[in-house]
Amino acid sequence: MLKGALSHLDGAAKYTKVHPEVLEKLQYPKEVMSARLFVRMDDGSRRSFRAWRCRYDDTRGPTKGGIRFHPEATQDEVVTLAFWMTFKCAVAGVPFGGGKGAIRVDPRKLSKTELERLSRAYVQAFAQMIGPERDIPAPDVYTNAMIMGWMADEYSSLVDYPCPGVITGKPIALGGSKGRDDATSRGGFYVLKHLQKELGLDNGSERRAVVQGYGNAGYHFACLLHEDGWKVVGISDSRGGVYDPEGLDPKAVKACKEEKGEVSKYAEGRDNVEVVDNDALLCKSCELLVPAALEDQITESIAKCLDARVILELANGPVTADGNAVLERRGITVVPDILANAGGVTVSYFEWVQNRQGFYWTESEVRQRLKQIIQEEAMHVWSLSKQKEISLRTAAYVHGLERLSEAIEAHGTQTYFHC
């Protein structure tokens, strides 16, 4: 996975002038730590879980990145996600570097008390690595505000003083920020709205959307599309999905998922709703496809069958390198993850700032600040794409690389020291 991610760095380097030392520094993570977490289970047994944390690059500030709980998590995945976070923060212009963490676990098989003990064990294991001035975790796949609250509390216990700024994505009552819950989706929606004319998705055209992945990001994005007049024709989760050419009600699908455990149950009793698997859903005809699940969903074979005009990557790395090459050949526009889902880390930055100030903003203030940042960066990436005649993905990496290069070269390179 990391090799594929680094190919975007190499591709961007062809379109901007950076010192070789910059590329050397960005090819490798600064720090990777692995640990075994030993947790007492409710039945009295003791189990161990693999866990990781990566601080990829901190040239532009403390590292920042989520912690995911997933049964297939690996160190390579964590390092790759931290690499993407490095560029995402640079593209958004927030003063952070990239970090990421994970525990290899299926949290759905744990009780709530086991989940709390596991969350606190992670902080105990990585307490020397994280910190409000060093590395700031946040929620990711299968983690949420409650888990972040447990982690922040555990860190505060270890340092013996309240330290809400160590983690973002916390409950509002524990120092979280208003507007954080839907920040990833709202940021992506602001990108879409700001570029909709350029993308050929303005109000004059038919607007059908498919959303793959129905966690926090996918659900909120589907709701925003629905409220804006889009016809959300397809929705899926990890167990499968539903498709209705006349459009689905995102809130009704969410209510069904919460009641019956999966999106596909929404088709029961509805003759016009088709049950589809995730691969079939990705290939349904639509103007906008929104991958909001995990990495590597759109492979080369899936890319060949896609029938979408625009892909907006709400998930991290949903398109493989081979799949991306096919999409470029087919002329399908991809709004890349390091721009499209940067709303989450941007509002996490706002939360960190508020924690440090002890002064909290209204939801409208958060959204307005987010909108201004995201729209400016989206237009900059679009302009770079047109100016250099490159894809939006490459343009986003060029934009991020130029900001990282400026920071890295400010410490001096061989050119400076040799003179």
Image: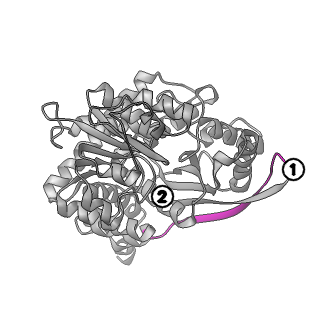
Q: Name the residue under label 1.
A: 44
Residue tagged 2: 81
Rendered residue at 37%/70% (across/down): 23
Residue drawn at x 43%, y 63% as measured from the top left? 411
Give the answer, above or below, for where 134 lies relative to 271.
below
Q: Which residue is drawn at 14% across and 59% down?
A: 389
**Relative to 416, residue 149 above or below:** above
Taking 153 as reference, is 307 above or below it?
below
Q: Could you tell whether 327 is left or right of 130 in the image?
A: left
Instruction: Work out how far the residue at label 2 is from the one at label 1, CA to CA, in angstroms.
Output: 35 Å
Q: Where, quadrant-wise, is the N terminus in this rendering?
A: bottom left
Residue type, label 2: Leu
Q: Where is residue 29 in the image (x, y as percent from the top left)?
A: 51, 66
**Is residue 37 inside the magenta stretch?**
yes
Q: Judge the density around disc 2: few (<14), some (14-19), many (≥20) Cα neighbours within 10 Å.
A: many
**In the image: residue 272, left or right of residue 129:** left
Q: Is residue 16 visible?
A: no
Colour setting = one colour
* Local SS, label 1: loop
For label 1, the crowd category at 10 Å Cα-Cα, with few meaning under 14, some 14 to 19 and many 20 or more, is few
- Judged from this view, the residue extending furthest toward the bottom is 418
User: For the magenta stretch, what is the residue range?
Assistant: 27-44
Label of residue 341 in the image:
none
- Residue 214 in percent (x, y) is at 45, 40
